[in-house]
Image: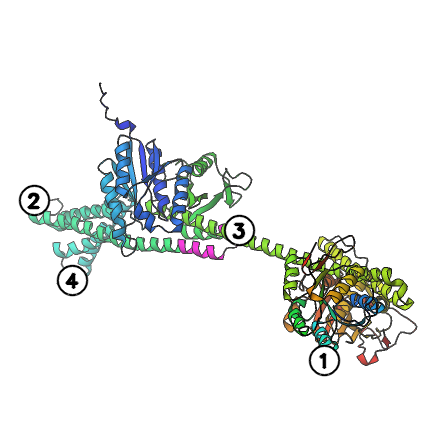
Amino acid sequence: MDIAPVAPAAPASRNLVIACIEDHPKAIKVLRIAQQRAQEKDGKWRAVFVETPAHLRQADDGSHERMLRLLTLAEQMGGKTEYIEADTTEKGLAQLFEKEAARIALVIVGSMEGEGRFGHWRAMPWMRVVALASQYTQVEVVPLSGQHYQRSLAEKLRLRAVRPMYFVYALLAVGVAYVGARALESLLPPALFRINEQNVALLFMIACAFVAGRYGLLPGLVASLASFATVNYYIIAPYHELNLNTVTDLLSIGLFLSAALLISLFTSQTRDYAQKAARREMSTSALFTLYRIASQAFSREQALEKLQHELERMLEVDVAFFLPPVLNPGDIAPAFPVELALGEADRKALDACWKEMKTTGTASPFNPGTPWRFEPMLSQAGEIGVLGIRPRGKTRLDAWFGKLLTAIADQTASVLEHIELERSIAETCIREEREKLRSMLLSSVSHDFKTPLAGIIGALSVHRSLGERLTAAKRDELIESAIEEAQRLDSFITNILDMTRLESGNIQFHKEWHSVQPMIDNVARRLRHRLRQHPLTVHPCPAGIEAYMDVMMTGQVLQNLLDNACKYTPAGTHIEILCTIAEGKGALCEVRDHGAGLPPEKIQRVFDKYARLLKKDAQIAGTGLGLAISKAVMEAQGGWITAANHPEGGAVFTLCLPQWRKKETKNANADTDGAINVPYEQAHRGY
Amino acid sequence: MSLTNKHIVAIDDTGAILTFLRISLEALGASFHGAATASGGMMLCETEHPDLVILDLHLPDKEGLNILPRLKHLSKDRNMPIVVLTVYKEQEVRDMAMAQGADAYLTKPFIMDDLIEIIHNQLQTGRDTPLKLVKAGKNARLLENGNGV
């Protein structure tokens, strides 16, 4: 049987990028780079995870879940995933490399070097993986911690940043040195200073050092050559001709050039250190700002606004955040600033960044024809949105800046994810709290409805069963008690309906001028049965006082207050109603009981809706809405209600009706001009 | 039905309920004392030595469930059935009340005939009555000795 020889794979078919991933917070970087490299090579990429017994033993509970999320993310990013089980990572990968040797173009490995004290040991398995992979193909090591970017010599010497004007400045500096030398010669007596090649060389050296330090190597070299030429031409004999014949001449030019080279290198190094320190400070500050904002922001919008402001200030770039709209989560749209105008090229770059989860825009390999740079905001849960920046003026998008942007984008994703999580937790808490309150309300309402119903049904059933055996007085008592309970039930229902109407704004107030005294008398009369065990004293109002109010609703408030006084004080407790006029405030109507008073810590909350409901020891019948309704009614009329404890004991509730007038009556006291205090002792009416 | 010479104490904070209990039980020949608070009720039970106690679970100063064991303790040396009257119809509350020593459990609102029937049963048979369901008119809501509908 003939076996066809296997032809070695053509180089063109080696277009598979393998991303070796493991459980690391930054493992997403390996995926991102694998995606980029595969696109550059027009190939495919695959995320590979090798599960080993050692990993299974060491992994914590969340490790497996994180790996699954990472593999899912890889699939979302357009890669394939492969899960290999093997004794060791190397063995697992070796199997894969053997199988796919013909297709693999690049292996990407994350390096964890430098992470903590034993970083080297942790880096070890990956170093072995790198060694293994390099037997088959190219390997790219992605640092998962720290900034491992190395600047080239050209960058160190700032060869790329030279401007033509720097050469003019270099020649000018040499000219200044020459003029300086001549000036010294003419100003100082020949006995003190005589120009020669030693002292003049120092002056020119200063000029060269200045230019090399200030403008970099190339202008420094030009200054060195110009200095040598000037000294050689003007100062050293033979004058007015250039000589390069002697060793001295060669030494001289060599010294000038070496000085310029060394100085520009040292200056560049110093500048590097300064720049590194400034950049480190900027990175730290940017990332710290993100943490700070994360801990302070209450909403996504607030966080984005603050982040945008802070990042623009620190990085000196325009910053925009793009998030998927709620209605169309597959799309991407500006989230802050919302009114951001993007051109067609910008939009394409943004879409590419969002859909392919890769860095696009200016100074990137993809969609570079736009002033914007788009960075996907990736978290462990996947892609959250896109960070867009538009450099202003001098800002250069170099490798360092790119890395900083990636870090900022990832960090922003974590911030947004964190806020979303907090919001969802808060929502759950609110929902639970609301449900709890609703259930408490239902239970309370059910209790409060059933209690008067029990009174009514019980009384009527006694009347029906035993009526013939009862005296007429007893029968009347039963009927009276049933009516009273029915009224109580009516009052509960009215309260609940009133509160609903007040809250929905469906209640109409019919405000007119009404006398205060008759309103109080009516309420007292209406509640006479309820007040059977609580002696009530109504002090006379100042004569002829009228208030602009809805008399029905205000009467209801008064009724609620009296009802409360009955409920919360023992039988026999004295209750008083006192009406006065307070200048600058209005007509005040006080309901005071002589009970134990309100607990001081609860005075502030007595008007809260369902305040009673929230009390664990709630025992008194009622929906707890009475005072909340009273407050709402008084405020809707432009007045107010307060609760306090009387200095002599008992609770005092004060209603204020700000619009009042004194109606002229025949009995009106001539002295009562609207500011009368009626003392308690003048009580004259008992109910 | 007669309750002559029977002494009944009711502890309930709703005045209307105490009123019709008083009128009906007195009409049936019983002597009646009512209290609106748990402490007042306990005092009545200690001084009046009632034959039967009607207890509401929702009282202003203390939960009725909390005074059940003390009432039970009072009836240690004599038969003093305790009939719980409450708006709570939840099974857990019912179970708790029976566990704390209630002899019968009736939910509000109720018809007086039902309560009178329970009182009769309790006073005639005492607490050793075998489990028995007593019909409560149309809506069977009476529970005796922990069972019912």
Alpha-carbon span between mark 4 and mark 1: 107 Å
Magenta segment range? A287-304
Q: How many marks?
A: 4
State the SS at label 4: loop
Quadrant of the snapshot with the N terminus of chain B: bottom right
Alpha-carbon span between mark 3 and mark 1: 50 Å
Residue A189's mark?
A: 4
Q: Is residue A370 magenta?
A: no
User: Along the line of sight, which residue is nearer the eye, A14 or B45?
Assistant: B45
Label 4: few (<14), some or many (≥20) within 10 Å? Answer: few
Question: In the drawing, does residue A60 fall left or right of residue A486?
Answer: left
State the SS at label 3: helix
For the residues beneath circles 3 and 2, the answer to whether they share a chain is: yes
Q: Is residue A589 above or below residue A187?
A: below
Horizontal and vertical percent position of residue B107: 72, 59
User: Along the line of sight, which residue is nearer the eye, A168 or A255?
Assistant: A255
Residue A424's mark?
A: 3
Q: Does label 3 or label 2 sit earlier along the sequence?
A: 2
Quadrant position of residue A660: bottom right
Label 4 or label 2, whichever lies nearer to me, is 2
Question: In the drawing, does residue A112 fall left or right of residue A187?
Answer: right
